[in-house]
RNA sequence: GCCAGUUUAGCUCAGUGGUAGAGCAACGGUUUUGUAAACCGUCGGUCGUCGGUUCAAAUCCGACAACUGGCUCCA
């Protein structure tokens, strides 16, 4: 989820605040106006934090009354009155003691003194470091603890709209009380607001869940298959298989070997890897096999019966480690690159599930590269190049590589206790990122437990941020599995392991691609690449000939001749997002030609059949955008 | 998992206590079609599930489930 949507757990510095854009100031001011309106309607409202965010602003409020969208018109009416009054935003610097006294009188984020203290504001005050100025902002009778900055007057807020209400934890901590988070959007003028609303409507049309239904890509069948476990329909399976084909070709060229591993493994696997018991709650509960269990010497009559526990795999790495361990390895074997489109199962919390983007069964574009320290930089670099190659193919321009490093305080708890290895591998990764001039940000204390990682963040059209792919260094788990190779000096050494999944999972990647392309896939990905429409019955044979020719070259081509008029069939083909629509009537048949229409681009004119076929094949082969 | 909202035909949706509706899709027929929807007809629903209130429940109440918006989490 977007960092910008997080409550300010890490307080913004004053410098960061001063760097707020004009629009952020306006939205922050609008949040004050909204709080002002809410407290006017419900005087017992307690406010927590009200920052601007990427998609507007929010204010967290604790209130007996449950705010619903039905309340929005009343709140908006109050807000409009405040904006119309054009009150100045007045900054006042106060001492900590005075601020505390005012908060205890319920005066903060309020219109006057109240019988109950402004409790969240007392909490916020505690977060302000000694020596930093404490300021209020006042408009009319409304005074709020706030570092600002704001617009000059409430009248500067040109146009706004409340969008939704959700719940959130105070300061984002699950242990804190829940508050109601009221979201709104604001702009300088109504035109911009209208444009934004229109864009939201556009974004809704691109939603992968909607397009998934329209195009027959996948279904989720909670009652039979289970929530979060998509069934890929034939059209969606085309996408899956085209991606796998791309991955297999790319990985073959990069020297990977393919492996296949079962979906289940014994408990011992995940005890050894360290995933159990730490990640047990993210895994499906185990299957217990009594029949196969080895019978230990009975300690007592009451001893529980022996049992083998099998888990559905939540990750492929331990399996690949066992493949590494299956044969003695020499330094000459390294780097060893094992790749698999592995199917994993994770028991995500029910509230986390989201279309294809967050699921419980997932197919990962996984691979593990076992290498020496000397080989690391080159291997890591090659992986990054692979990412960039893919982004180019898919036209992914907006992305950020999130480089997560360890935090010292987590050593031995959240992270394996290898302080020197952490520093060393992090430096290696950092150097690769700098050398390859990749757009990256460094985030401390977010690493995996076994090493630093890079997550590729992308944004869906609706503005949601997703981790699309991941690339991790692992200097811990190979040792847990006792993986070694025989080095030049005839000693056994533990390899480093790079986990990488440039295409992420099919589920999330395809979910993303659907929204990225709005369902209008490039020819090589399109579930139906060509549809041939004979104008009358007299051209059916000619049309069939074209379809046969294309299908012989693995092109997904269909013929359609039904009772519908040509207009109707074109409409249907366009609605189905068929990439090439070839209309063939008497004239085309006569000239051995086709009338080309490309989805979304309209008519392309009548062209020789052989030319069009050659062009189609070339576009597919080159995976043109 | 938490807070809130939603759930009516395959899809999109109407239906505020009194006999379940429309468009599209599907199916049958008529039409032989020239670049984003020809015409007629037919089929299709235990109104998410279970329970309650009522003479009577899609409609009111409760529980559960799923989905959605957020939060928390995300190897």
Image: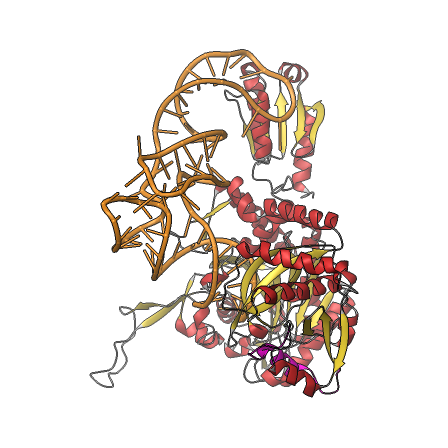
Q: Residue A335: where, in percent of width, then height?
A: 63, 68
Picture quadrant where residue A277 is located: bottom left
Left or right: A282 as drawn, with respect to A494 = left
Left or right: A539 as drawn, with respect to A623 = left
Picture quadrant where residue A368 is located: bottom right
Segment tinted magenta in the rendering: A112-133
Task: Determine if residue A450 is in view.
Answer: yes
Q: Give A347 or A131, whichever is nearer the viewer.
A: A131
The residue positioned farthest toward the left in the image shown: A301
Picture quadrant where residue A119 is located: bottom right
Rendered view: B31 above or below A353 = above
Q: Residue B20: where, in percent of width, then height?
A: 35, 34
Q: Give A141 or A401, whichever is nearer the viewer.
A: A141
Q: How is the image coloured?
A: secondary structure
Query: Could you tell me which residue is drawn at 76 percent across and 55 percent down?
Result: A188
Rendered view: A404 above or below A225 = below
- The C terminus of chain A - image quarter: top right
Q: Give A358 or A35, whichever is nearer the viewer.
A: A35
Rendered view: B25 above or below B63 = above
Q: Residue A623: where, in percent of width, then height?
A: 67, 44
Q: Residue A577: where, in percent of width, then height?
A: 59, 36
Q: Give A462 or B4, whichever is nearer the viewer.
A: B4
- The N terminus of chain A - image quarter: bottom right
Task: Determine if residue A337 is in view.
Answer: no
- The number of numbered badges drawn on the structure is 0
Q: Is residue A121 magenta?
A: yes
Left or right: A573 as drawn, with respect to A30 = left
Left or right: A553 as drawn, with respect to A610 = left
């Amino acid at each position: 989820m977007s960092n910008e949507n997080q409550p300010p757990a890490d307080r913004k510095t004053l410098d960061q605040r001063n760097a707020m854009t004009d629009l952020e100031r306006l939205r922050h001011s609008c949040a004050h106006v909204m709080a002002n309106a809410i407290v006017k309607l419900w005087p017992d409202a307690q406010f927590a934090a009200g920052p601007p965010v990427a998609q507007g602003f929010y204010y967290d409020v604790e209130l007996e009354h449950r705010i619903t969208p039905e309340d929005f018109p009343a709140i908006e009416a109050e807000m409009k009155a405040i904006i119309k009054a054009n009150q100045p935003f007045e900054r006042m610097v106060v001492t900590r003691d005075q601020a505390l006294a005012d908060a205890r009188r319920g005066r903060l984020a309020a219109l006057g003194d109240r019988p109950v203290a402004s409790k969240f504001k007392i909490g916020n005050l505690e977060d302000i470091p000694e020596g930093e100025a404490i300021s209020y902002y006042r408009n009319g009778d409304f005074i709020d603890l706030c570092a600002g900055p704001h617009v000059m007057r409430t009248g500067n807020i040109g146009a706004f709209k409340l969008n939704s209400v959700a719940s959130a934890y105070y300061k984002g901590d699950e242990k804190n009380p829940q508050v109601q988070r009221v979201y709104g959007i604001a702009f300088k003028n109504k035109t911009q607001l209208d444009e934004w609303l229109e864009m939201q409507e556009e974004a809704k049309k691109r939603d992968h869940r909607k397009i998934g239904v329209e195009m027959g890509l996948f279904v989720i069948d909670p009652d039979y298959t289970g929530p979060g476990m998509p069934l890929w329909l034939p059209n969606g399976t085309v996408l899956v298989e085209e991606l796998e084909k791309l991955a297999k070709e790319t990985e073959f060229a990069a020297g990977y070997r393919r492996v296949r591993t079962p979906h289940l493994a014994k408990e011992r696997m995940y005890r050894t890897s360290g995933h159990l018991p730490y990640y047990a709650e993210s895994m499906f509960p185990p299957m217990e096999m009594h029949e196969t269990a080895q019978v230990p010497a009975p300690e007592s009559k009451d001893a529980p019966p022996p049992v083998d526990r099998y888990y559905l795999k939540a990750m492929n790495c331990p399996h690949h480690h066992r493949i590494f361990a299956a044969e003695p390895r020499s330094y000459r074997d390294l780097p060893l690159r094992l790749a698999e489109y592995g199917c994993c199962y994770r028991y995500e919390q029910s509230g986390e599930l989201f279309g294809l983007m967050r699921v419980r069964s997932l197919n990962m574009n996984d691979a593990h590269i076992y290498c020496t320290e000397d080989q690391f930089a080159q291997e890591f670099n090659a992986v990054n190049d692979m990412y960039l190659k893919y982004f180019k193919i898919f036209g992914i321009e907006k992305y950020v590589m999130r480089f997560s490093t360890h935090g010292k305080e987590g050593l031995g708890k959240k992270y394996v206790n290898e302080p020197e290895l952490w520093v060393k591998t992090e430096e290696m990764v950092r150097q690769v990122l700098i050398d390859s001039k990749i757009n990256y940000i460094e985030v401390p204390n977010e690493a995996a437990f076994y090493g630093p990682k890079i997550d590729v963040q992308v944004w869906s059209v609706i503005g949601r941020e997703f981790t699309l792919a991941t690339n991790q260094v692992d200097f811990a788990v190979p040792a847990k599995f006792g993986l070694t190779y025989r080095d030049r000096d005839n000693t056994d050494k533990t390899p480093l392991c790079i986990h990488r999944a440039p295409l992420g999972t099919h589920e999330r990647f395809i979910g993303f691609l659907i929204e990225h392309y709005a369902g209008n896939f490039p020819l090589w990905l399109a579930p139906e690449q060509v549809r041939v429409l004979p104008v009358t019955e007299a051209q059916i044979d000619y049309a069939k000939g074209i379809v046969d020719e294309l299908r012989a070259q693995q092109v997904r081509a269909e013929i359609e001749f039904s009772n519908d008029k040509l207009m109707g069939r074109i409409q249907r083909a366009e609605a189905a997002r068929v990439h090439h629509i070839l209309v063939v009537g008497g004239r085309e048949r006569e000239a051995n030609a086709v009338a080309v229409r490309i989805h979304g681009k309209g008519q392309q004119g009548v062209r020789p059949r052989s030319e069009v076929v050659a062009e189609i094949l070339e576009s597919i082969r080159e995976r043109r955008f």
